[in-house]
Amino acid sequence: MKRIPRGALIILLAMAAILVVASLAAACGTTHTAINRITDTPLGPQQTHETGHVTVDGFHGPCAMRLTIPGNHPLADPSPTCTPGAYDPAIGPADLCPHMSAQWAAARAPTSETNRVKFTTIPQAYHLQAYSDEELDHWIPRELGGTNSELNLVLFPGRIPDAKDKVENALHRWVCAVISTTEQATRLRAAQVAIATNWTTAEATLGVS
């Protein structure tokens, strides 16, 4: 019988191993399959419908958290491809102005689900160590129509309330400050994009004083 050259045999064994791993992954499934889908383009805020539960929409990796600490106040900046922010397009000014409606305010995910995201999902995706004193933050805040999608949840270090909370409140007041519901809706969409893109510059981008 003709012997297979050693180099060819190694290649065949490697290919067989890859096929076995792929088959096992397909059979078992994984929460973070999207981590392997590498993209260079930020997704921008995504539309997801609120269900009152954490929705598993997957991450578009690779996931990397940038963290700066000016003046001893940590500022989180998650990957725009993993945590682009998500909002419910069915939620508008009538649900948010001048205050969040009782129904929208009550549509928060159960603690069991948010703890899973805080201590398992996000740390695995971002390769982080989760700490109990970190806040599970809505990247697009609830007061601007942000949902409980995994694409809108991020670990935010530091004390509560944090610097981002002040920005969220300012943008909410800005959205609701005008009388026209049409203009409110326009401002809402602009605020969602601005805070998801860079919350530290959102007020300046929108001219909010």
Image: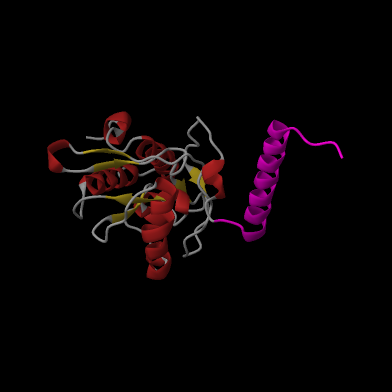
Write the residue at 68% across / 53% down.
Answer: 23
* Rendering coords of residue 208 (x, y %): 26, 35
Per the image, is 117 magenta? no
Q: Quadrant of the C terminus?
A: top left
Q: Is residue 93 visible?
A: no
Residue 18 within the magenta-colored segment of the rendering: yes
Residue furthest right as drawn: 1
Q: Nearer the viewer, residue 183 or 44?
A: 44
Task: Name the image quarter holding residue 83.
Answer: top left
- The residue under the point 68% across, 51% down is 20
Residue 150 x/y as whole percent: 46, 53
Residue 119 visible in rendering: yes
Vertically, is 105 above or below 172?
below
Furthest residue in direction left, as rendered? 71
Colour mode of the rendering: secondary structure
Q: Is residue 206 above or below residue 177?
A: above
Q: Is residue 33 left or right of residue 169?
A: right
Residue 171: % across, % down: 30, 43
Which residue occupies 46% across, 49% down?
151
Boundaries of the magenta span:
1-30
How many numbered dots are placed on residues in this image?
A: 0
- Foreground residue among 72 and 93: 72
Residue placed most toward the observer, 150 or 126: 126
- In which quadrant will I find the N terminus? top right
Q: Position of residue 134 (x, y in %)?
A: 26, 55
Instruction: Determine the residue located farthest toward the front in the rendered image.
Output: 1
Is the stretch drawn in magenta largely helix, strand or loop?
A: helix
